[in-house]
């Protein structure tokens, strides 16, 4: 059975996966409401405005590590013969923890004050927000691993 990093980071799929991940991020940010949604939207806009293509660059950079972090959950779904999206949804907390362990490290090492500051302001609600994105993320993974 192929690993998630092998599948998602292959030359044949990588750009398509990155495109879909950027679409998921845009949709998740767009769906946010209330005061916390305003903060997320403002932070996202600030990070996007650092330079054109910044979000895409970050997704390209994070994809191999995210795929590696999610591979155990992906393998569990395959072993249990259940849809990846269903397994991810049932384990949304684990998915969020796996992804946030990567972004926490990246944010700490960032040399950009805007990136660090924005991440630190939003980190308190990050797990909840990542868990809310799990259904869309699961669908992207399912689409590219089918």
Image (cartoon, rainbow, N blue to C red):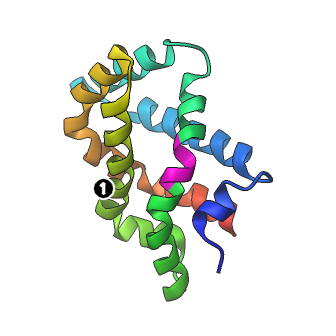
Quadrant of residue 18 within the rendered picture: top right
Whether residue 46 is in magenta: the answer is no
Q: Main secondary structure of the magenta part?
A: helix
**Residue at left offset 30%, top offset 28%:** 119
Q: Which residues are magenta?
A: 62-66
Residue 43: horizontal and vertical position, in percent?
35, 20
Image height of 93 relative to 124, above or below: below
**Residue at left offset 28%, top offset 41%:** 126
Residue identifier under label 1: 97
The answer to whether residue 107 of the structure is visible from this angle is yes
Disc 1, SS? helix
User: In the orientation shown, which residue stands out farthest toward the bottom?
Assistant: 80
Q: Residues within 10 Å of mark 1 (few under 14, many from 20)?
A: some
Instruction: Please name whichever residue, 106 or 125, is drawn nearer the observer in this view of the structure.
Output: 106
- Quadrant occupied by the N terminus: bottom right
**Residue at left offset 19%, top offset 37%:** 124
Image height of 87 relative to 58, above or below: below
Quadrant of residue 54 within the rendered picture: top right
Instruction: Please name whichever residue, 125 or 114, is drawn nearer the observer in this view of the structure.
Output: 114
Instruction: Please name whichever residue, 89 or 99, is drawn nearer the observer in this view of the structure.
Output: 99
**Residue at left offset 69%, top offset 70%:** 146
Q: Is residue 14 left or right of residue 27?
A: right
The answer to whether residue 143 of the structure is visible from this angle is no
Residue 77: horizontal and vertical position, in percent?
49, 78
Residue 13: horizontal and vertical position, in percent?
74, 53
Q: Is residue 122 left or right of residue 82?
A: left
Residue 144: horizontal and vertical position, in percent?
68, 60
């Amino acid at each position: 059975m192929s690993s998630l990093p092998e599948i998602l980071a292959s030359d044949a799929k990588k750009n398509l996966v990155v495109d879909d991940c950027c679409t998921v991020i845009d949709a998740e940010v767009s769906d946010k409401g209330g005061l916390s949604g305003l903060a997320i939207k403002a932070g996202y806009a600030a990070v996007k405005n650092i330079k054109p293509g910044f979000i895409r660059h970050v997704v390209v950079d994070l994809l191999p590590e995210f795929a590696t972090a999610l591979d155990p959950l992906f393998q569990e779904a395959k072993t249990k013969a259940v849809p990846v999206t269903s397994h991810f949804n049932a384990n949304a907390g684990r998915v969020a923890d796996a992804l946030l362990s990567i972004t926490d490290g990246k944010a700490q090492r960032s040399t950009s004050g805007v990136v660090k500051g924005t991440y630190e302001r939003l980190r308190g609600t990050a797990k909840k927000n990542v868990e809310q994105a799990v259904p869309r993320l699961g669908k992207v993974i399912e689409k590219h691993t089918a």
